[in-house]
Image (cartoon, rainbow, N blue to C red):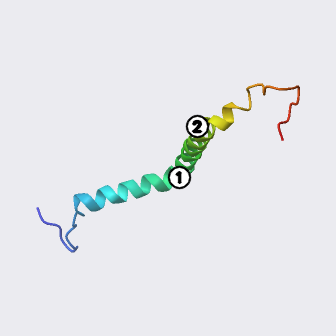
Amino acid sequence: MQRRGGAAIRREPLLTRAVSAVFSFVRIAEFEILFFLFFVIAFLIFKDLTSRPEYNQIFVKKPGGDDFWPF
């Protein structure tokens, strides 16, 4: 059946619809995505800092005195 008095409706290609759907999702969930990324980046930085040997030396008592601050 053909429509009268109007242009034919063209469906967009599948890839275009998929990209549009992704962009609309990102636009809606922008805050949640940024919130999640903040914690992931903070975790990675904290993990990197605490895995260094110098960080572990903070908790080890230094031999040779009661000097709390080694500097």
Separation of marks 1 and 2 at Cα, in angstroms: 26 Å
**Which residue sits at x=59%, y=35%?**
51
Quadrant of res 15: bottom left
**Which residue sits at x=68%, y=36%?**
55
Residue 28: horizontal and vertical position, in percent?
Answer: 50, 52
Residue 54: horizontal and vertical position, in percent?
Answer: 67, 37
Residue 21: horizontal and vertical position, in percent?
Answer: 36, 55
Q: Which residue is mark 1?
A: 30
Is disc 1 surrounded by few (<14), some (14 to 19) or many (20+) residues within 10 Å?
few
Quadrant of res 23: bottom left
Is disc 2 surrounded by few (<14), some (14 to 19) or many (20+) residues within 10 Å?
few
Q: Tell me which amino acid carries mark 2.
A: Lys
Q: Which residue is mark 2?
A: 47
From the viewer's perspective, tell me whether residue 29 is left or right of residue 60: left
- Vertical side of 35 occupied by 10: above or below: below
Q: Tell me which amino acid carries mark 1.
A: Glu
Residue closer to the observer: 52 or 62: 62
